[in-house]
Amino acid sequence: MRFRLFSALELPIELREQLDDVLARFRESTPRGGVRWVRSNNIHVTLKFYGAVDADLVPQLEAGLVRAAQTAEPIALTVQGLGVFPNPARPQVIWVGLQGDRDPLQRLAAVVEQEATALGFPPEAREYTPHLTLGRVRPQLSVEGHDQVMKLLEQADVQALGEFRPEHLSLMASELRPGGSVYQCLFSTPLAQKENTTGTD
């Protein structure tokens, strides 16, 4: 048996409700069928996408996440601002930004990456960029539709939606269904939230 897996920090219900309001506004204002918007209960801070993983390897992944979580420093993140990947001229992913304690989040992601690499997973080719994915632009969207989406994002005023402090690191399973992906938490381990004693700011 194989699972489609990724590691993530999950969001509190209150923040999901705030994102629900943002998504509702976007759905009403973008070309019908032009963007596949994410359901708010599927929004999370991805740390590492593993892809299809044999069930026999899951315990080793879990052990690696426990080790990574034990290195974690306190993290407080504010959800604010909008952006796209890879660039405004060719938007494929629409995201909302994460401000605040990005450095300890980056360090946690780096340890998760190291644990995955030690198990044989290929390292990420791009630098880790903390974000929350809101939607994915469909390939068939017209040039005019792209312009409409970018105009909407430029005019949208997404102020700070709230702050959250992650307390657990989770291993998530993604099941692809006709109506979209369905996520299930397979394993969760508490973050140690140790203070940084390296002497750096």
Image (cartoon, grey):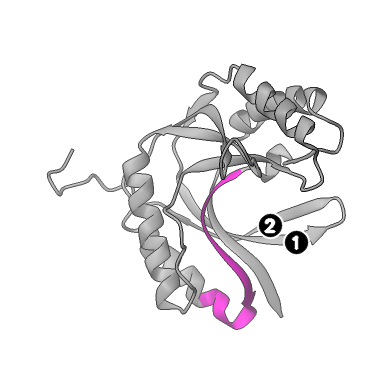
Label 1 belongs to which residue? 175
Instruction: Identify whether 34 is placed above or below 21.
Output: below
The residue segment tinted magenta is: 44-59
How far, Cα to Cα, is label 1 from label 2? 8 Å
Can you give x and y, in whole percent of width and height, for residue 186 in the image? 62, 63
Q: Which mark is residue 30?
A: none
Residue 74 visible, this orientation? no
The residue under the point 71% across, 28% down is 147
Residue 30 visible, this orientation? yes
The residue under the point 69% across, 60% down is 174
Instruction: Identify whether 37 is placed above or below 180.
Output: above
Disc 2 marks which amino acid?
Answer: Gln
Q: Total number of numbered labels?
A: 2
Can you give x and y, in whole percent of width and height, for residue 121 in the image? 49, 74
Q: Main secondary structure of the magenta part?
A: strand
Q: Quadrant of the C terminus?
A: top left
Image check: 105 left or right of 133?
Answer: left
Give the mark nearer the N terminus: 1 vs 2. Answer: 1
